[in-house]
Image (cartoon, rainbow, N blue to C red):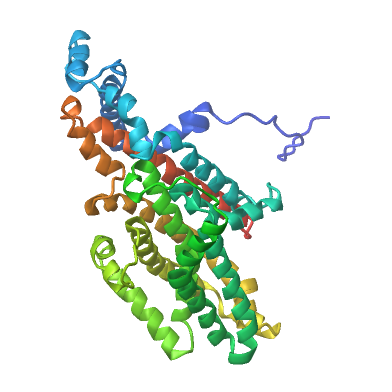
Amino acid sequence: MSDYSYVRTDMLPQKEPPVSTVGPIGWARTNLFSGVFNSVVTVLMLALVIWILVNLLSWVFTPTWAAQSLSECREIIAALGKEHGACWGVIRERWIQLLFGFYPSELYWRPILTLILLFVAMAPILFSERVPRQLLYVSAAFPFLAPWLMWGGTLWLPLMVAFGIVIGYAVLKVLSPVIGTLGGTLAAIILPILCWVFAAGPVAQGLHGIIPVGIQGVESRLFGGFMLSVWIGVVAIGISLPLGIVLALGRQSDLMIVKYMSVGFIEFIRGVPLITLLFVASTLLNIFMPPGTNFDIILRVMIMATLFASAYMAEVIRGGLAALPRGQYEAADALGLDYWRAQRLIIMPQALKISIPGIVSTFIGLFKDTTLVSIIGLLDPLGLSGSIRADANWNGIVWELYGFIALLFFLSCFAMSRYSMHLERKLRTDHR
């Protein structure tokens, strides 16, 4: 009996989609060759990219690593029958100077050890789920060990700085119940600062005279190269984030004096170029210190860079706070949390998560702005490139030095950018 139904009784076997619509070919047809105009633009841009790459690779891959001067590089390039080529001999000869400046070569182990300790100290903070929590002790000790390793001197000075933190914590615990949280916090900030300015140095020298414990000192004028940029950037980044949080909360405070002080500081710093603040740090800041105080130039630059970054950080974090729904604040009130516990447990974690892209952008911008210190006489990589080009052997070298410096900064900034993307993915809660 024949079946004349119009409804199919069996399914056709599934077939693969046409090759021209999937994979690299499908993507190219959709995005690069979707029409006549797009196809012409794609071909022209592809030809331009190939031309640039061919000339760039021909310039980069030039066997001039053994050259001792620019003239010798040019002789090697001419012998190869090429008109242009990179002179990498300057990098082979001066790369250590570009990294460490004039830091004593026999003490290179100290900045290297400091960098290793930096990564160890950041590990439990950046990758808390993968590393032992015991490394937090290294994180707590690093802010005191790092300056001692870099500058040297007596070990009692960083211990006195740490003791100032202990004094501040004790004052906060003792005075907060008596004079209130705000008064206790201000006392816990002011008293350690006074201790560091007036007492830390003399007491450390006195203790060193009794029990001499220390390492060879290094003058700040010997700091330079990429090491100096990293050192200034790490300190400014590490301090500007908590200071920016305090300023953002101060700007939203109901206490008028706290609010107006925070607003005034933020608006003043954001309205002044960083280079102006650096000139203030190099020339005027010493005037406001007690007579006889030797305020290190690098420390002054660190302070100004930190204040500059903290003002921008405060606005980034304030944007995260403003993006939170009002219900989050009401939920904290419903749980009976006081202001500080609500901020620590509910409000601030969400605001920081929202602000991650802006925070990292501020960090990257600050790290790149450390090159401005060359204007006030500090020998960062750009400052050293000028002194290298002043050498008769390398007079005329430009692209090779700047290319090497750009590569160092690119790798550092790219690493920060990639970590921020990793952190955003890890903290996502929408599951999209």
Residue 356 horizontal/vertical position (percent): 50, 59
Residue 363 horizontal/vertical position (percent): 42, 56
In which quadrant of the rendered image does the C terminus lie?
bottom right
Residue 36 lies in what quarter of the image? top left
- Residue 407 placement, left or right of 125: left
Residue at (48% x, 44% y) in the render: 415
Q: How many numbered marks are there?
A: 0
Residue 297 lies in what quarter of the image? bottom left
Q: Is residue 194 visible?
A: yes
Tell me: residue 243, above or below residue 109: below
Residue at (40% x, 38% y) in the render: 31
Tell me: residue 212, above or below residue 308: above
Residue at (35% x, 46% y) in the render: 223
Q: In this orientation, which residue lies closer to the viewer: 301 or 429?
A: 301
Toward the front, the furthest residue is 210
Residue 379 horizontal/vertical position (percent): 28, 45
Toward the right, the furthest residue is 1
- Residue 7 placement, left or right of 67: right
Residue 344 horizontal/vertical position (percent): 62, 72
Q: Is residue 350 visible?
A: no
